[in-house]
Amino acid sequence: MEILTAIKRVPETGAKVSLTDDKRDIDTTSLGFTFSPHEECAVEESVQLVEEHGGNVTVLTLGPEDATEQLRSSIAMGADDGILLDGGDEEWGPVGTASAIAEAVEGSDTGYDLLLFGNESADAANHQVGVRVAEQLGLPCVTGIKDLEVADGTATAKREIPGGSEVYEIDLPAVITVKEGLNEPRYPSMRAKMQARKASVDQQSPEPRAEGLELVELEVPETDDSPAEILGESSEAAEDVVDVLEELEVV
Amino acid sequence: MVLTIVEHDDGELDDVSLQALALARDVAEQTGESLDAVAFGPGADAVAEAAGAHGVETLHTVEDDALADYAPEAYGRAVVQCAEELGTEAVIAPGTDRGAETLSHAAAKLDEPMAAEVTDVEVGEAYELTRQRWGGTLIEHSKLTADTNLLTVAANEVSPSETGGDAAAVEPFAPDVDDGDLRVQLTDIEQSDVEGVPLGEARVVVSGGRGTDGDFSELEALVERVPNAALGSSRAAVNEGWRPHDDQIGQTGAKIAPEIYIPAGISGAVQHMVGCKGAENILAINTDPEAAIIQKADYAVIADLHEVAPAIAEELEARGHAE
């Protein structure tokens, strides 16, 4: 089976986020980069599916040229090929991103059986790229999946709800967006990382589209860092803890 | 007119839908439009009273048998048809899996932009939005320019507000969907074999992180002493294999909104805190007074959770709080 898995390069933010002077981006001068836990699970799932059913995993990203680093990380996890949709340094919105990915799929000689996405990107959280790609390609789609099985051209996909799961059956080819918890992503071996450095990455240059949603500026929210009331420094604080619970009427 | 997609469980509106209605009513008041809602499935008309009490004038109900079970693309199609027939200014959905999914389908079909995780709207020439990035660690101010403004409302950020209005007028709406729209449809609901209160619904959440050293027994015992309490964990504890991912609280796990949250042995990384920002109160138990979680907490006990948790359970028992 042929699987295309989409990822997005994002900064590894620490305990505190700081912004660039124009307030339009995170200041990444001292930050490393990664891709989100949802997408790590998407890559892991695609590698596992191909291990089970045979086939190929192509990992795709739209972003700056430096995003090849994240493609190579995915290749080290077991993906076969990488595609970079070179979007330059400007951030792309969900309309242009989805359109570029759908066009890359349409223009490819590979007939993909499954397109996997993260449920939402770690940074912009637009919650829509997978669905837009599916709509543009005329494929069925389900989002937010935490359990996936494929057999006989049909995917059984489960989405968590309070106290259980919703079950969807979806004929391939299809688009599925996933959440962390789907699997436990592997740590690639040093050897796999070395080999991934040499893997070839296909580059394409898509055209951006008008977005409709235009960034004005970012803001780091004020957090209430007023000191906590210290109830105690030993198990004797249990009395005060129970006082608090009684006051809140939760016991 | 401003149209809000509302979700319900056999006629009872869910909390995130009430939050979406509050933001939608604000938009409706700013634009001078009326507020309508659309509800799907059996029992949709039973929503009329609660919807009316939250400002909805007309409730459009889709009770077509073919759409009784949730079907993302068909629901998106129905929203498009309802919006086009009514000539809507904006369609607003709750920030749930279904809300985002349905509205994304509608956005793609309408070829319109969609803004997710919105917390505030100022209507000027364009919609000036405040929305969340990075699970709320970062706020985005942006402008939405569209013929139909499509928004999802960030969960647990906007307070529901009642107007005390009369029940909404109910108008059945019959969408025209075809088999293609029904390719994906809910086929089954599996009950979790995990007993107890779901994390998202608990009034008290106790959770453990790396500081548990993998031993959650005292925290489990504490949770059993408290009614409507659930046990959660940090991502670190899940990565160690100590807890299942379903217990994880954070940006890529469960979002909780309890009366009180009791993180024990959790350092309080930003990604964890965005999962519990809906908590009314935080009482941290940690041996490290410098841990970030102490800054974010309302109350703190600086001590070993393996000693404090059993002591709390004993004190509860001594005061007759048996569960």
Image (cartoon, coloured by chain):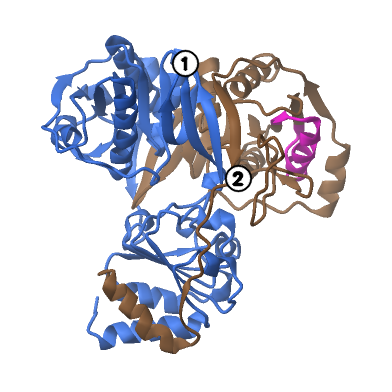
Chain colours: A brown, B blue
- SS for callout 1: loop
Report if residue B70 is visible in the image: no
**In front: A160, or A244?**
A244
Location of mark 2 (residue): A41
Question: CB of mark 2 within 8 Å of CB of mark 1?
Answer: no
Q: Is B127 rendered above or below residue A43?
A: above
Viewed as shown, does residue A75 lie left or right of B101? Answer: right
Three-letter code, disc 1:
Ala
The magenta stretch is A60-81
Three-letter code, disc 2:
Cys
Location of mark 1 (residue): B146
Residue B75, position in %: x, y?
34, 24
Viewed as shown, does residue B220 lie left or right of B322? Answer: right
Residue at horizontal 24 percent and vertical 21 percent from the top: B34
Specify the subunit that label 1 lies on. B
- SS for callout 2: helix
Residue at horizontal 62 percent and vertical 37 percent from the top: A53
Q: Is residue B23 magenta?
A: no
Residue B142, position in %: x, y?
54, 29
Report if residue B312 is visible in the image: yes
Residue B93, position in %: x, y?
36, 31
Viewed as shown, does residue B1 lie left or right of B108? Answer: left
